[in-house]
Amino acid sequence: PSLALRFARYLASENIGLRVFRKNGFETPRGDPWEARPELIVWSGGVNRLAIEQSIKEFKEREGVEVSTTYGGCGSLTAQMKTVWEKPGFPDVYFACDRVYMDNVNEWYLASENVSETDMVILVPPGNPRKVRGLADLGADGMRLGVADPVKSALGRLTVDLLKKSGLYEKVYSKVETKAGTADFLVNQIVVSEGKSLDAVIVYLANTAKVRDKVAIVKIDHPAALASQPIAISRISEKSQLARRFVDKILSPASQERFEKVGFRWQPGGKEGGE
């Protein structure tokens, strides 16, 4: 249906189709500017990548558009946003790693929509040689712990908050040997080194989808061991109609199946932030 959708975009374009409708007395919403093959800029926390890649591919093919994606730690992404605000390249859509990294850019986005959530877990080599059963065990003598960087990554910031709320920050954080920019790096350290470089890492359950046969996963029994992923459209996007359809694709039933398959819980619903 890409040709039909292209025609629909032409009719609903701000500078062509809607201008004709208004001249003929119709009231219309604001549309996107006409482009035969528009490009949507999407920035997303790395944790969401596996869950949305197929949906993005389908969206591009069905709509006949380009989608430029940037994945990374949400601390790094939001810091980069400050340098490109109101400039070409500012993301039309932002899909955050966690609510805290949406709340700190609310002024740049319309109301965000909840999509999913995932648990934080402890990842250890097969057989769990250090017998890690929970957070407290990460403070054991000789423990070599890997965590995400709290400046660059939502996971890193959430890890610090979790340890403080559980009363284990001083005991456990002193065992940190690696602070990584992304959770994928931490996962690879456990998979590749098989415990030779690190004894344990703290990541999201959704980060483990492709390696669950190569690692052991230890659940964290604490209400703060949780991250929620909201999505929002930029206030200044010139492609807000296309961006809205993209968000609807991410909130679709087919997308839900993909999120749940890789370790998320589906949590679509209420909006937060300003309009």
Image: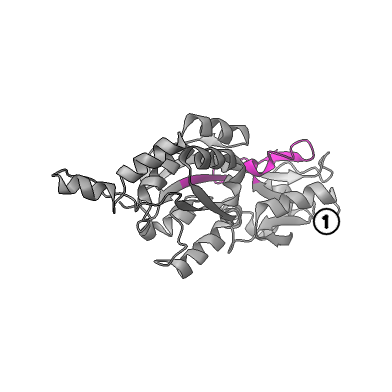
Q: Relative to 176, say whether 245 is above or below.
A: above
| Element marked by disc 1 | loop
Q: Position of residue 68 (x, y in %)?
A: 53, 53
Q: Residues within 10 Å of mark 1 (few under 14, many from 20)?
A: some
Please state the extent of the stretch shown in magenta in the rendering: 204-230
Mark 1 — residue? 197
Residue at (47%, 36%) from the top-left corner?
267
Residue 121 among magenta residues: no
Q: Residue at x 80, y 39 (%)?
A: 214
Residue sitting at 35 percent across and 39 percent down?
8
**Relative to residue 244, is residue 171 depicted above or below?**
below
Specify the amino acid type for callout 1: Ser
In what quadrant of the picture does the N terminus appear?
Answer: top left
**Going by the picture, which residue comes out furthest to the right?**
196
Residue, far bottom: 83
Quarter of the image for residue 129 reads top right
**Tally of numbered tags:** 1
- Return the x and y of residue 275 as percentages of the image width and height: 30, 51
Q: Residue 22, position in %: x, y?
A: 18, 48
Is-magenta flag for residue 220? Answer: yes
